[in-house]
Amino acid sequence: MKLTAEQVARFEREGFLFFPGLFSPEETRVLTEAVPALYSRREAFNVREKGSDAVRTNFAAHLYSAPFARLARHPRMVEPVQQLLGEALYMHQFKINGKMAFEGDVWQWHQDYGTWLNDDHMPQPRAMNVAIFLDEVNAFNGPLMFIPGSHRKGVVDAKHDLTTTSYPLWTLDDALVAELVERAGGRDGGIVSPLGPAGSMILFDSCLVHASGSNLSPWNRVSVYLSLCAVSNHIRRHKRPEYIAHRDFTPIDCLSDDCLLRQDPVDLPWRDGMPASALVTSAPEPAAVA
Amino acid sequence: MKLTAEQVARFEREGFLFFPGLFSPEETRVLTEAVPALYSRREAFNVREKGSDAVRTNFAAHLYSAPFARLARHPRMVEPVQQLLGEALYMHQFKINGKMAFEGDVWQWHQDYGTWLNDDHMPQPRAMNVAIFLDEVNAFNGPLMFIPGSHRKGVVDAKHDLTTTSYPLWTLDDALVAELVERAGGRDGGIVSPLGPAGSMILFDSCLVHASGSNLSPWNRVSVYLSLCAVSNHIRRHKRPEYIAHRDFTPIDCLSDDCLLRQDPVDLPWRDGMPASALVTSAPEPAAVA
């Protein structure tokens, strides 16, 4: 899959590209059907909503679930990102976010790269977010909201929000969000939400400012969020456990375009459980020496 | 303003009617400009969001603010309700809900009549909700969500939710909401959100099941919610203070159609503060005598 010059220009201008229905219903079903078993596991890699048993986010399924291991190497997803970043890629983060019916909580306004810089010491924003819808996303089940063009500001100020939801996030303050929305067109396009069927894909810049509302509807809004980083831009610090921020910088080799249905063989290094080393984090930094 | 037979039939079928831009920008501005002074008051009638200073709901402004006292007697609002209920009306409840930019919290799925029955002993659902937008309502600032036709189920089971938000509400359980949405068309129209400019009005049945999401956008979504009750159907219990559930069952007399701009004279009984009697509530009910 090769992006056109028009698509590349739009990505640079808007900070995202939307591909409705890129994966077929059959391909999507293979992924969706694997989710309940993953969410039911009582493991550190399943973060649940505040005051609820619903899974907010599952980490690193590509290391222990065959369908998601195939998705992590899917050419329809990897090749356009490689084209945009111009380099081989490794998997920095792999999440299946629940945003479950009635239970799904908000994600505050943030840039993903803010977290990767502050927590993981990723040198540059040479990484891409990919969202793949496992359910239809509509106006009622808490769609992603983007501020088009906000990635062009680069990294902006953020503070570490440890209380609003069950997952810590480097979030932007209200005045800055208001300013970015105004700059992007205000009520006329300053916020946009790509809506579409299960199997749709969004590529979005790691500096694009985004958020999503709560899900009060009776419809789950499960999405896979893959973060692909240019190999030369790998993270320099392991403050967060390995199931959140990966430490294997091996370039991704793509499988075939029909790998999800053909069930191409894949390696599952965490099939029998997470290694103890995945929970080891780097020591606090030494104080600066004068 | 007289509803057509088609509008009356639609109201009976769907449970609501939407009038985009019914009040002009000039009329709406008179109301909007009066809100900050009302919200700034440290009074029992201003309920603030959980953990925030933003006003969630202001009660009874029609008793101490001239523009809102005029709105409460506006023929464009009162006459169609009178037509639908076929009787003189009194003001049961008058709210200005904030749903402020970045701060506005959810309203869980509920029927207003559930609260009026359980708390106020209103005999029948012969009362109407009216929403008037003081700000544009768009997909991003927490619009109302309706389940069309759900009013035809009459009063449904609800439980008193005292914890989710700062305001107690009789809310529906998830399974019932899912069933109602499915019956109303599921993903094809089972939930709808009227969106439109400031000055728009919605009439909706007091049994219509509704909710609204959080407001993460930089745009306030202030709305007036008036609840008009048939005079013969007045409440029988004063468990809630008078600023929440009114005890004056005098029929509403309409002012002129241009009362907002002409500034028609109005009576403001609480201009100098709420009377102490407004806080007096009825004694707990005596135990049943065998």
Image (tube, coloured by chain):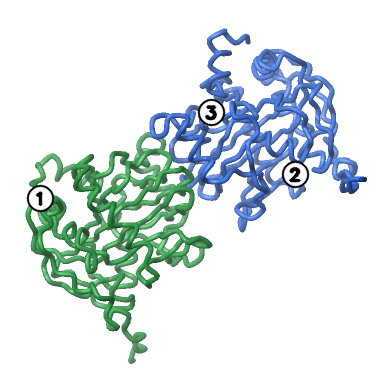
Chain colours: A blue, B green
The residue wearing badge 3 is A198
Q: Is residue A185 visible?
A: yes
Name the secondary structure under disc 2: loop
Q: Are marks 2 and 1 in contact (CB under 8 Å)?
A: no
Residues tagged by mark 2 and mark 1 found on one chain of the structure? no
Tell me the subunit letter for badge 2. A
Q: Read off the residue under disc 2.
A: A45
Give residue B258's mark.
1
Quadrant for residue A169, please give it: top right
The amino acid marked with disc number 3 is: Ala
Q: Residues within 10 Å of mark 3 (few under 14, many from 20)?
A: many
**Disc ID at residue A141:** none
- A198 or A112, nearer to the observer: A112
Of A6 and B88, nearer the camera is: A6
Residue at 57%, 34% in the rendered image:
A209
> In 3D space, how far apart are the residues under numbered discs 3 and 1 (Cα atoms)?
50 Å
- Residue A185 % position (x, y): 43, 29
Question: As shown in the figure, which amino acid type bears the numbered disc 1?
Answer: Asp
Density class for disc 2 (Cα within 10 Å; few <14, some 14-19, many ≥20) is many
Of the two numbered discs 3 and 1 in the rendering, the one whose residue sits closer to the viewer: 1
Q: Secondary structure at mark 3?
A: loop
Q: Residues within 10 Å of mark 1 (few under 14, many from 20)?
A: some
Residue A67 in view: no
Q: What's the CA distance linking mark 3 and mark 2?
A: 24 Å
The chain under label 1 reads: B
Q: Nearer the viewer, mark 3 or mark 2?
A: 2
Residue situated furthest right in the rendering:
A289
Is B190 placed left or right of A134 in the picture?
left
Q: Position of residue A274 (x, y in %)?
A: 84, 41
Task: Work out whether mark 3 precedes mark 2 in sequence or the reverse, and give the earlier one.
Answer: 2
> Same chain for marks 3 and 1?
no
The residues tagged by marks 2 and 1 sit, at their Cα atoms, a distance apart of 62 Å
